[in-house]
Structures are given as C-alpha cells and as structure tokens.
Image: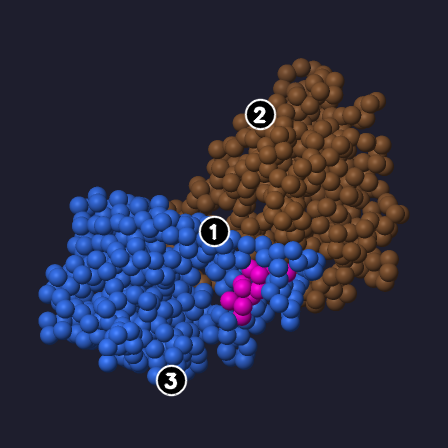
Chain colours: A brown, B blue
Amino acid sequence: MCGPPTATVMNSLGHVRPLSMSFAQPLPLRSGAVLRDYTLAYETYGTLNAERSNAVLVCHALNASHHVAGTYAGDPKSAGWWDNLIGPGKPLDTDRFFVIGVNNPGSCFGSTGPTHINPATQQPYGADFPVVTVEDWVDAQARLCDALGITQLAAVIGGSLGGMQALCWSMRFPSRLRHCIAIATAPNLSAQNIAFNEVARRAIVTDPDFHGGHYLAHGTVPKRGLRVARMIGHITYLSDDTMDAKFGRNLRAALGAPTAQPGDAPRYTTQDIEFEIESYLRHQGDKFSEYFDANSYLLITRVLDYFDPAREYGGNLSAAFATAQARFQLISFTTDWRFSPARTREIVKALLDNRLDVSYAEIAAPHGHDAFLLDDPRYHGVLRARFERIAREIGAES
Amino acid sequence: MCGPPTATVMNSLGHVRPLSMSFAQPLPLRSGAVLRDYTLAYETYGTLNAERSNAVLVCHALNASHHVAGTYAGDPKSAGWWDNLIGPGKPLDTDRFFVIGVNNPGSCFGSTGPTHINPATQQPYGADFPVVTVEDWVDAQARLCDALGITQLAAVIGGSLGGMQALCWSMRFPSRLRHCIAIATAPNLSAQNIAFNEVARRAIVTDPDFHGGHYLAHGTVPKRGLRVARMIGHITYLSDDTMDAKFGRNLRAALGAPTAQPGDAPRYTTQDIEFEIESYLRHQGDKFSEYFDANSYLLITRVLDYFDPAREYGGNLSAAFATAQARFQLISFTTDWRFSPARTREIVKALLDNRLDVSYAEIAAPHGHDAFLLDDPRYHGVLRARFERIAREIGAES
C-alpha cells in the first residue's frame, strides 16, 4: 500500500488504553490533609528509551483527562484531547518521545476523586474530598514518574491550568525536567478569573440537588448548576471575535425549519432559544452536566484560584523561580482574554531575571483561550521546533 | 449664611418624589402584542420653561429606575442613580433644565411590569408579561412627553441600555429631540454580550423556585438564580484592572478576625469564601435578589438582545440613521469591555455617513462599563460642555 491511506495510518497512534497505578504511601497535601490509598489513571504513548530520557509529561486543564491522544478500540470518536499535537510524526512525535498523560487526583476521570470511596468512612468522599493544589498534583505526578523509573523528564508541557503544573514542576523539582513548556497560562489568577470561577461554584453549590456536596448519597446530581458553570466557562474560553464570526446575532431556525436567514423575524421569547449562541451554550452545558462531577468542578476551580507561586516570596515571582533550571518555552495567544499575553509576559520577565533559557511566542490567533487546543500552524510550528531541539539534546532523533 | 454649607445645599436637589401616570390607550408592541391599561412611574427635577423647550429625558439601563436624582424625604441614603450628574449646578443643571426620569414598562420599580395585575386574567402577569423592546420603551416615553406637553426634548441621554434608547429616539422621532447623548453603548449586542445574558437567564429559569415564571402564584422567589445572574453581570460591569486594584488576590479575613494580611494562609475551602472578590460578589448577588424581579430581569436582558436598528436595513447601520436629525454626543470608556469603544465608533461612523453633527469622546478611565455612572472629571466635563451648548441654543442660560 502507498499514498494517503498509509500516510493517515502512519500519522495515527491507533488504539490506546487507560492504565492505572495505586499508591499506598499517603500523599501529604498543601492544606495539611493527606490523601490515602489513591490511584492515578494514566496513559502512555510511544516507547521509553533505554536511557529513560525521552519521557514527556502532559498536564491537563480543568475538564480534561489522562486521555491525551489516540482513540479507544471500538470508539472512533474517542480521540484524546490533544490528539492534533501528539502522535507519530506530529509536533510531539511519539516515534521519538514517550508521552505520559495522567489524570489528577480530585478530577473525575479515573484517578481518586470525590466520587470514590473515602477509606476513612467507606462512603463516597463527596464534599469531604480534600482540597488539592497544583503543588499536590505535581507531587503525585512525580511519584508516578518514580514508579515508571523516570528520573528526569525530557519535558513537562501543559496549557492553561496544565501550564501552571509545568511551571510548578520547574520550581518544585528543578532537576527533574529538561524543558518546561507552558501555554496560555498565568502566574496566578486575576481577581476577574477568580470571580468567574466563584460564580460557577455558586451556581453549583446553590443548586438544591447539590446537598452540600453529598448529592451521591441523595441520589441526585446538581445538573442545573453544572450547566450554568459550563456556560460561563465556555464564554471565557472563546474570544469575542470568534463568537461573532461563528454565531454573530444569527437567529436560531425554528424547530423543523431550515436554518434561520438573516431576514427572519425574531420570535420574542424570554425563556426559549432565540439566538444561535444560546443554542450552542445550552448544548455545551447539557453535555457537560452529563459527565462532569460537581465536586471535582469545585476542587479544580480552587486548584486554579490557589496557584500563586510568588505568594510565599512576598509577591516576587522572580524569587519563586530562583531555583529553576529548565529551559522554558512560553506561548500565549493575542485574543486570549482569560489568560492574556500580559500575564505570560510576567512569567517571561521573572525567568529572564533569573537568566534562564527562555523563548516566548505570542501567537496572533483569533480563537481566544481555546487556541491552545487547536492546530494553528504557527503555534504547532513553535512546538515542533522545540521538540526537535529536545530530541537533538537527548539523542532521540529519528 | 455663606460658605460651604450653603454651597452644599445649593448643589442638592433636596427631596424629590415619585409620580405616576396611567395610560388608557393600549401600547402596541413590536412583538405584535399590546400593553393595556399601563402606568409609568416617573420623576421630574427642575422647572419646565414657558416655551417647554428645556426638557431632558434620562433613560435608565438594566437595573435602574425613574429615580435618577435627589433623595426621598426621610431616607438620606436614597440618592438617585445619576445624582452625581443631575442637580443644581451639576453638569445636567436642574436650574436650567427640566429633567425627566421614567421607569420603563416591564421593569420592577413602579411602572407596569410582571408583578402587576394582568387585566386579562386579574392575576399577576408573571411570565405572561409581553416581551418589550427599546422601540416600545421609546414609544411609551414619547407618550409621557405628550402628556407633559413636551413636543421637542432638548436632549435624550442615557448610558448602556439607556444609550440605546437615546439612539432609538433619534431614529424613531427625529424631530422630537435636539440632542442625543449616548454613553457606553453599542448599535447592538455582540454574541458574547448575548451569551452573558443567556447564562444569567438560564440561572434564573432553571431555579426550581422559578416555576416557569409564575413564582408569585407559588409564593416563591428564584433568589438563587437572581444571585448568580447579578454576579455574572457585575463581573462584566467592572474592568479587570479595577477588580485587581480593588480586590486583587486578597484573602478575606476570617469572621471576627482583623482584615486578612497578604501573608495570611489560605483556609483551603471549596464552598466557603476565601478571596475578597468572592465576598464582594456574593454580597452584590444577595442584595440584588432581595429587590429585583426575576421576570423583569429576563425581559430587560431581552430588550438588550433585541436592539439592532440596522437589522431591518440588511445590517446597514448608516441606513438606519438616515432620517436622524439630532446633534449627537457619543462617549465611551477605554476599559469598558462590555460595550467597547469599537462599538461606539461603529455608531460614530454611521452618523458621519449621514453628515450629522456628532462629537465623540473616548475617555481613558479605569472603571470599565461602570464608568458611565461615576464622576470622572473629563467625562463630566464633556457632558457639562454639551449641556451648556444646549442651554445656549434654547436660551436657557442662567
């Protein structure tokens, strides 16, 4: 066989499968609590080389998982959330690198979280799951690396909250990563960021089906709150321009009617859908409320809120990076108003203050925060070049 | 008496009182429905001159009322929402102008709205209150002016949704206003604006206490939804910078403790308040849910969504203003991301396309959309100069 079909197969990871690893040693958390008897769900792609030097850890953001690339057998729609980046011949090339995706504790995709049994009570944790932080997640990830026999990662990469984890690695385990790749992220959340998180949390917590977080025991799910939370989030992931280009002020066609035309008359309704953007947001909210755990949403928005490495240095971010040794690649997107380029520039300045090796790409992309998940060629070009450099450094050239 | 105390008294409207006027003639609405037997709550300040030429109509935005200036007897905290602008010696000087504030139908401050009795059923309207639009509001305002014997207004002024009404006046009743003053507004809502409104509406509509909008009949109030709606709104009224300056990442002091210091440790909580911004937003939401009617919130966010004068001209805003005759003053604020300067510039361009008399001030103010309610000296300076010009034109100089 030759030509496109083969090329397609060559460029695909094919079927992947989730793995899990249990940890008997309790994980001490930043809050003072400990996490006992926990399990991490993870996946790996590619092959760890003999020197164990080609491992790349991928950190997920709010609502993603360890399923980063490839598809599951029998489910062709199950592509991993960063499948456009990771695979054979892709910018993060699994023919060269051993890629690890891991679900963080407190999330709801397999690693120990609020829906799991609390060993202290033999009931689901629910609202009693301990508050976790970026630092705790990074500690858990480091233990997974230990178990996989990986002393030093070729790189840690992540976008948004995933970028915070990558940065945290560089401060917490300076010698355990060669490269730190942090995309569409920030050194901490602004008051506005926290405010959006708080509104989402209030929508969930005040849903009568939330029952103080012990909804599983009540046989309910706070879906109304989850829907509103997701709708708020979704607005902040997209740029104003993208929304206008995609939906504008288009009216939604009446049910059964062809697509609404610009000349169509509004129906004048307060509770029904009138504009396409409303239909889109409701659909996103509905989908999300079917699979995401409400306590995980609270926990992970708090992981975002609490991340602030400069805090213990009196607000001095440069001091926070004083022990970092990694080489850094920072990337931001011009229309990302959730984690704006200005916030990434704060990180770049702090790294330069420490005379670290840092490259920064500010990509003029229209897609807002979501751009980090898309395959803008300039963006992927920066990442491809970075991983080629890393491959040369570790002798993993193909 | 002389000196400051007198000056203070001179600069105050003193006590004002709400008035109301009932209209027997049904108001035909843009939706095709009609509003029967309606009442408008309004207030006036200053004195209508013999020529009836010095009247200025003030249009309110989402959550304000006819109570624009002055205080009510016995309630010194009841200052009108634009009291910093309107009064003796203030930029809109009630020694020269006769100022009218009117509550729009569908709102909840005295004019006929969803909490009032539907003459067709003798029950509260609730969700059956007809959908109203900016055009309908302007028609109702014009009838009030008729009843007050005012053929031509010296000016119509408003900010945000109030600015939309001012613009609508210039198109709908071109000869009935000399000046149109539209502040922090837009020719229509963007998809992002509609999206924020929609999330707020979903929070209200999915509150189990909403009962399809007939909560009064059920003896409930959808306060949870109203709280979330207000929190979302409040985030969009403020700039990111203002939020950072006012709250930053400050932790809220524990109850009973002195104010939290930057070095204070977080308490690690998902449901309780941790940051000051959270406390502020919750307080705003709680206050709002005590006085604002949920159906009015749905109706008025739809008034915003539906405003789009260019729509019936195939999207050509210049064509929409073809019959306008007023002199225009447009003002926007650089940090207003809800109604950005770019949106006001669209209006300016359309007015200039029609060779209309237009002035535009883009004020570098840090306060976001809320700036239109504050007393930035450059902003108030522009308005003072505009009203002095109007006073000269109508011979109302003091």
Q: Which residue is mark 3?
A: B74
Mark pair 3, 2: CA separation:
69 Å
Q: Which of B167/A177 is in front?
A: A177
Residue A184 in view of the camera: no
Amino acid bearing label 3 = Gly
Residue at image coords 63%, 27%: A357
User: In the displayed image of the protein, which residue is found farthest to the top?
Assistant: A2
In this rendering, the answer to whether A280 lies above or below A82 is below
Locate residue B125 relative to residue A143 in the image: left or right.
left
Residue depth check, mark 2 versus mark 1: number of the one nearer the observer: 1
Labels 2 and 1 share a subunit: no
Q: Which residue is mark 1?
A: B241
Chain letter belonging to callout 3: B
Q: Is residue B278 magenta?
A: yes
Residue interval drawn in magenta: B274-286
Residue at image coords 22%, 54%: B328
Q: Quadrant of residue B250?
A: bottom right
Q: Quadrant of residue A232?
A: bottom right
Q: Which of B398/B59 is in front?
A: B398
Q: Which SS class for mark 1?
A: helix
Label disc, if present, on residue A381 of the rendered structure = 2
Mark pair 2, 1: CA separation:
33 Å
- Label total for image: 3
The mark nearer the N terminus, 1 or 3, is 3
Residue A249, image x and y in percent? Answer: 41, 49
Residue B83 in view of the camera: yes
Residue B375, image x and y in percent? Answer: 34, 61
Q: Quadrant of residue A309?
A: top right
How would you rate the neighbour count of disc 3 (Cα within 10 Å): few for under 14, some for 14-19, many for 20 or more?
A: few
Q: Which SS class for mark 2?
A: helix
